[in-house]
Image (cartoon, rainbow, N blue to C red):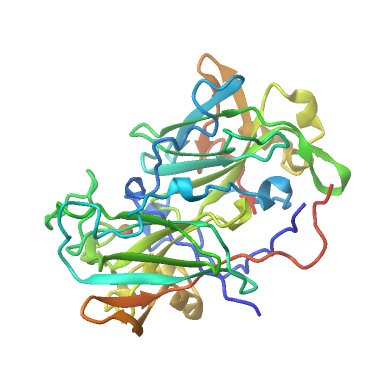
Amino acid sequence: MPDAFRRDDRDVHPPLDSPPYKSTALRHPKQPLVYLPHTITEVTGPALGPARVGELDHDLTRQHAGEPLGERITISGRLLDGDGRPIRDALVEVWQPNAAGRYRHRWDRWPAPIDPNFSGAGRCLTDTEGRYSFVTVKPGPYPWGNHPNAWRPAHIHFSLLGTAFAQRLVTQMYFPGDPLFPYDPIFNSVRDPDVRERLISSFSIESSRESWALAYVWDIVLRGRDETPMEAGP
Amino acid sequence: MSAPLTPSQTVGPYLALGLPWEDGPYAAAAGAPGAIRISGRVLDGSGDPIPDALVETWQSSPEIGVGFRAFARCPSDDDGRWFVFTLRPGPVPGPAGTTQAPHLDVSVFARGMLHRVVTRIYFADEADANATDPVLASVPPDRRETLLARLGNDGHRFDIRIQGLDETVFFDV
Ligand SMILES: [Fe+2]
């Protein structure tokens, strides 16, 4: 049986009760969490494989008859574990609004244009070095109802299954230098400013492709295996 | 070499754009012999349905084979309802030579939740196995009920109460 995973430091993830983000009020447990040992259920996970991913799923600019409007960009990086080891053949799923900041969703009613050539969802599998890559357009910032004049900094939602239930993570990737960072209670829900910085991608001139697209690079790190013997061995 | 962990962020209200799969709720193919349906609602601290949640289940089983994904994913509907279709899990090893009762691990994501919450589904009709399960034993006795799926007309019923009266037990994984 595989090893257990290292437990996260307390300050890595945002607290579920985070008053500046108002919707957390009725959506956080008030009872203490119960410690769950890492048994076989937690240290294993689904192997989904290439059948989950269509040929153009990684390219959000080629899913319709025409190209979407906006700034064409690439997002790429590596999926690693806490020991810096690549996580291979793992599913990476993304979703985002269009260049005007509008999601193609029935609940998104803010009057920015819908782009008929942009759905805003993508997926890919990491390669043997843990690399993933997407082609898309840069998402726009958008308003939301959390507080007066509330705007989300531009971001792309990421979902990672890793290799085990214990590694599951959903997060958001931001863009460098966004002027909305100081005002966003979701970004700032990660309390340690150094940890928060890990959510921001870097611009890369080396990875940008001449006369085609600017490149942003972002590595994602999931938990590593515990070096100590299995805490829950059979 | 150690690498710094990436923090969690909320799945937001528009998870339905990127996460649901057409076959998502079907860990076992529809019509698979012996398959069971588990369903319920996701409710907030006011007892109102959470219509923008995602429920994922994972189960480990020695009999995992072709055609059984063991993983299911279902977005909640406008009434907070979700379901999965799967094979009934068997007992699996637990810590220190114990045996765990049949269970599924569950992740719940939603707008307003900055990190997933994790719970487990056990089966009310496995009383003997549940009585010796090491994880259930670590849960305060008056809260264990919240982890039991109950068989009804529509398969096994398991509601997830994020907060408030009869709050579901959530785990630190
Ligand atoms: Fe968003």
Foreground pick, B39 / A70: A70
What is the residue that sits farthest to the bottom in this orientation? A205
- Figure check: B63 above or below B18: above
How many numbered markers are drawn? Answer: 0
What is the residue that sits farthest to the right in this orientation? B97
- Please state if B171 lies on the left or on the right of B133 as rendered: left
- Please state if B107 lies on the left or on the right of A229 as rendered: left
Q: Residue at x 53, y 54 (%)?
A: A161
- Please state if A179 lies on the left or on the right of A219 as rendered: left
Ligand 1 found in image quarter: bottom left
Residue A11, x across and y down, in percent:
57, 70
Residue A9, x across and y down, in percent:
63, 69
Q: Visible in this render: residue A32?
A: no
Residue B170, x across and y down, in percent:
60, 46
- Figure check: B17 above or below A158: above
- Figure check: A24 above or below A211: above
- Please state if B116 lies on the left or on the right of B3 as rendered: left
